[in-house]
């Protein structure tokens, strides 16, 4: 039904444009719909497909004029929920918590198919397994999920999370922190790990997915609000068509995609962007049938893990937290 309505709406727009041209007045056919997209953090290779869609005109092809915004203190989920942004970047873990709290935000696409994060430390620290966390200092950002994840990994080695010194390192970057008072931290290898390689700093890396399939969740994801899906489904579909094309470009042409991101965000380190893009591009779609595809098992597994570790007050209705409805069909 939604596609029929979309076709009917398109017919009306075309008819209106034709009428305008015949009368000699401005048809308005070149006017684009203004859309706001808020990132989860500063621009990086997780976001490449978005910048490609903008630079290559994929948004414009869909009749969209997209403004890419930084989240500020409010955070992407809140900006999307309040309607101050039409789309956002989030992660399954934060979106799950938001849904439990009644925030009407929904994931409409997985940017990366598998969790590429884990606990990293300089090799000289001698942290080779979760049991080595005992007696060490972990630098985090103060979220309850951090201790829960540390505990779940350490339990497998019969180690005690209470013997870990957990501190909040705020906005201090990984490399500065491990030179001062931090022994290990939670990083995304596709950015910080690649930067370590470029710096010649060898790391011990423990990916979460090596220890539990339930920790293989989607991070990051693209989001929109329930209201946006209900009232403007054609806009959501158009947005996802452009974004999907952007990420497909990044999958097939990582070098060119990296150049686009570098040009769009000149403050980024070009060498890091290119190396990160080469590492990450194959992981956008990975083993999924199409870019952006989400599996309800992934949503259920992680929500169950969070609930069992007392991170959620109630169980998540996983089928309401995400949708594949707006992804383009495979050709």
Image (spheres, rainbow, N blue to C red):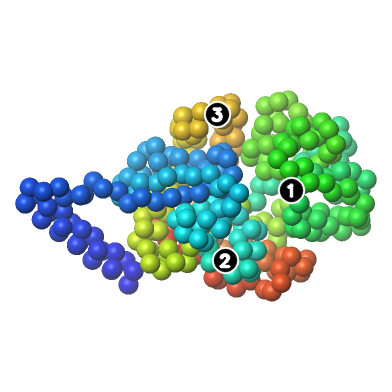
The residue that appears at 23% across and 66% down in the rendered structure is 8
Is residue 108 among the parts visible in the rendering?
A: no
**Residue 18 to residue 52: above or below:** below
N-terminal-most mark, 1 or 2 = 2
Q: Is residue 145 left or right of residue 77?
A: right
Callout 3–callout 2 Cβ contact below 8 Å: no
Gap in Å between the C-alphas at discs 3 and 2?
Answer: 34 Å
At horizontal 66% and vertical 47% (from top left) the residue drawn is 116
Q: Camera-side residue: 267 or 116?
A: 267
Check the picture and name the quadrant holding the C terminus. bottom left
The crowding category of the residue bearing disc 3, from other C-alpha atoms within 10 Å (few below 14, some 14 to 19, many at least 20), is: few
Q: Quadrant of residue 199?
A: top right
Q: Secondary structure at mark 2?
A: loop
| SS category of the residue bearing label 3 | loop
Q: Is residue 111 above or below residue 304?
A: above
User: Distance between the Cα atoms at labels 1 and 3?
Assistant: 24 Å
Instruction: Answer left or right for 199 relative to 49.
Output: right
Quadrant of the rendered image containing residue 320: bottom right
Kindly check if marks 1 and 2 are in contact, taking CB atoms under 8 A apart as contact.
no
Left or right of 183? Residue 108 is left
Q: Earlier in the sequence, mark 1 or mark 3?
A: 1
**Residue 72 showing in the rendered view:** yes
Residue 272 position (above or below residue 211): above
Q: Which mark is residue 267?
A: 3
Disc 2 marks which residue?
103
Where is the N terminus found, in terms of image quarters? bottom left
| In the foreground, 25 or 257 | 25
Q: Could you tell me residue 207's position as x and y percent?
A: 73, 47
Horizontal and vertical percent position of residue 136: 89, 43
Residue position for label 1: 141
Which residue is depicted at the point 71% across and 68% down? 312
């Amino acid at each position: 039904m939604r596609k029929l309505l979309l076709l009917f709406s398109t017919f009306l727009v075309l008819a209106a444009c034709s009428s305008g041209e015949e009368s000699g007045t401005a048809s308005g056919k070149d006017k684009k719909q203004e859309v706001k997209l808020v990132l989860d953090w500063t621009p990086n290779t997780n976001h490449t497909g978005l910048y490609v869609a903008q630079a290559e005109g994929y948004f414009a092809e869909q009749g969209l004029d997209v403004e890419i915004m930084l989240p500020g203190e409010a955070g992407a989920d809140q900006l999307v929920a309040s309607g101050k942004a039409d789309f956002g970047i989030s992660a399954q873990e934060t979106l799950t918590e938001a849904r439990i709290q009644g925030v009407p935000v929904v994931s409409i696409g997985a940017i990366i198919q598998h969790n590429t994060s884990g606990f990293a430390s300089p090799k000289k620290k001698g942290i080779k397994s979760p049991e080595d966390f005992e007696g060490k200092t972990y630098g985090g950002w103060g979220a309850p999920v951090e201790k829960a994840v540390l505990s779940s990994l350490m339990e497998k080695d019969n180690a005690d999370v209470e013997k870990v010194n957990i501190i909040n390192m705020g906005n201090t970057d990984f490399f500065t922190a491990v030179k001062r008072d931090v022994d290990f931290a939670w990083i995304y290898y596709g950015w910080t790990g690649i930067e370590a390689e470029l710096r010649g700093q060898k790391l011990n890396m423990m990916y979460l997915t090596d220890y539990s399939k339930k920790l293989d969740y989607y991070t990051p994801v693209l989001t929109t609000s329930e209201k946006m899906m209900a009232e403007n489904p054609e806009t959501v579909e158009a947005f996802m068509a452009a974004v999907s094309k952007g990420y497909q470009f990044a999958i097939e042409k990582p070098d060119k995609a990296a150049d686009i991101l570098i040009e769009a965000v000149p403050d980024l380190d070009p060498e890091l962007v290119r190396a990160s893009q080469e590492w990450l591009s194959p992981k956008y779609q990975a083993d999924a049938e199409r870019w952006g595809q989400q599996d309800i098992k992934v949503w259920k597994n992680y929500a169950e893990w969070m609930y069992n570790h007392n991170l959620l007050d109630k169980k998540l209705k996983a089928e309401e937290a995400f949708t594949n409805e707006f992804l383009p069909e495979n050709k």
